[in-house]
Every structure is written in structure tokens, then in C-alpha cells.
Amino acid sequence: MCKTMNRENYRLLEDYMSSCMEDSAHDREHVYRVLFNALEIAKTENDVDYDVLIGACLLHDIGRKEQFENPDLCHAVVGSDKAYRFLTEHGFKDDYAKRVKNCIETHRFRSSNPPDSIEAKILFDADKLDVTGAIGIARTLIYKGIVSEPLYSMLPNGRVSDGSMDSEPSFLQEYKYKLENLYSNFYTARATEIAKERQSIAAEFYNCVYREADEAYERGRQELDRRLR
């Protein structure tokens, strides 16, 4: 039986993916990193359908544009529907399209709709790995810039908030509420291992940003007060 994911079909899906990607934090290179992370994870798992996995990785973020334009939409749901339509319209079997759809629909972190198949779990883990470590920090900063959110918020006493008690979005708040807590939320052992290798890099960057900003305010305000007397 012919493989679903031959080079011709790969290029078909790749071209469609490229036409959907406009967000620089969720661009083609993010998709390739997710795909390559997924292939690395899959080597350590059993009974993986690589045709489904590759297709799901390539198409997992094609709903991002719709969510960016309307935040009430979920890119995983929108993208899974778009993927299913595209695959069936281009001659892929319905069962294959449904399995890819399921992977995409469950790749976003939501306790109400967790991934169930091994391919869906690998996609989930591979996507989350791209929010860990230095890459995760860089992507978060890019996205915060796109939506015009600051590095940090200020406390009433004039000091820099570490983000842990903030309700307003910022980079430090995103780290404390999301990035810091990613490292134990993986389904596969290989993804957990890779994430742990990256954890200290992200923590060090967060601590440096907070410390450098807070020290600048502390020293600077004291000096400003002295100069304004």
C-alpha cells in the first residue's frame, strides 16, 4: 500500500501551511521545529503512524490567523476543521483526515480536551517544547511585541513586579503563569527529558530580566531624588 506521506504530498501540505502562516511567533520555522521535535520523540515511542504525525505537525497552526483576528476563536478547533477540509478536498482518505484533525484539535493545552492517540500526544509535546528554554523565551518576547504588551508591570511602591501576582499581561507575568510551569506537563518521556535540559536557561533569563530592571529602578529613583532636592 502506498504511503500517505510521500514527498509530493508532503510538499502539498507544506505549501498550504506556508500560505496560512502570518504570525512571526508561529511561523514556518516554528512548524518545522515542532515537526523535528516530534520525529525525535517518536523514535522512543511504539506504534506511531508517521503519516498522521507528519501531517498533523505541518498543519497544526493553520488556524492562527483566524484566532488572531478574533480572539474568541480557538486556533486548534479552527485549524483542525481547515485541515480536514483541505485533506479531503485533495484526495486524502477520510479516516486519515479525521485522525489528523483529532491531533490538531487536541494540541492546545486545555484540560477539557486532552490528546488521546500517541500521535496527538507527540504533537502536543513537540509543540510545547517550542515554548521551553531559550527558544520559548524568544518566541514569547516576539509575541508580546506583536500585541504591544510590556516586559513587566510596576507595583504601587514603585518597584518592578516579578509577575507572580499580576493580572495585567507582560513578559514576566507570562513566565510566572505559563512558562515556569511547563516542564512537568508532557506525555512522553523523551519530551520531558528535552524540556528539563532547557529549564535552567529559561529561569536564568527570567531572573536576569527581573533583577536588572528592578535594580535600575531602585538605584535610579534614589539618584533622581538626590538630584531633585
Image (spheres, grey):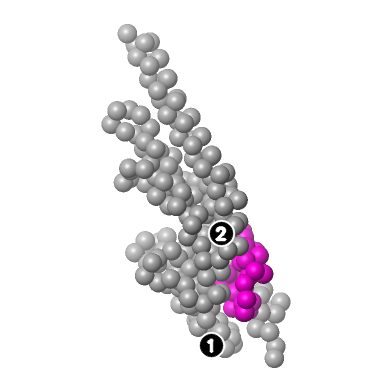
- The type of residue carrying mark 1 is Asp
| SS label for mark 2 | helix
Quadrant in which the N terminus appears: bottom right
Q: Give residue 192's mark.
A: 2
Please check the rendered image and state whether residue 54 is part of the magenta-colored stretch, yes or no: yes
Q: Nearer the viewer, residue 218 or 193?
A: 193
| SS label for mark 1 | helix
The location of residue 76, given as percent across then percent down, is 45, 69
Q: Is residue 138 left or right of residue 67?
A: right
Residue drawn 57% across and 55% down? 195
Q: Which residue is farthest left? A: 156
The image quarter in which residue 218 lies? top left
Quadrant in which the C terminus appears: top left
Please tell me whether mark 1 or mark 2 is closer to you in this view: 2
Q: Residues within 10 Å of mark 1 (few under 14, many from 20)?
A: few
Image position of 45 with respect to 200: above or below: below
Q: Which residue is farthest top? A: 229
Which residue is identified by label 1?
95
What segment is highlighted magenta in the picture?
29-58
Image position of 187 with respect to 137: above or below: below
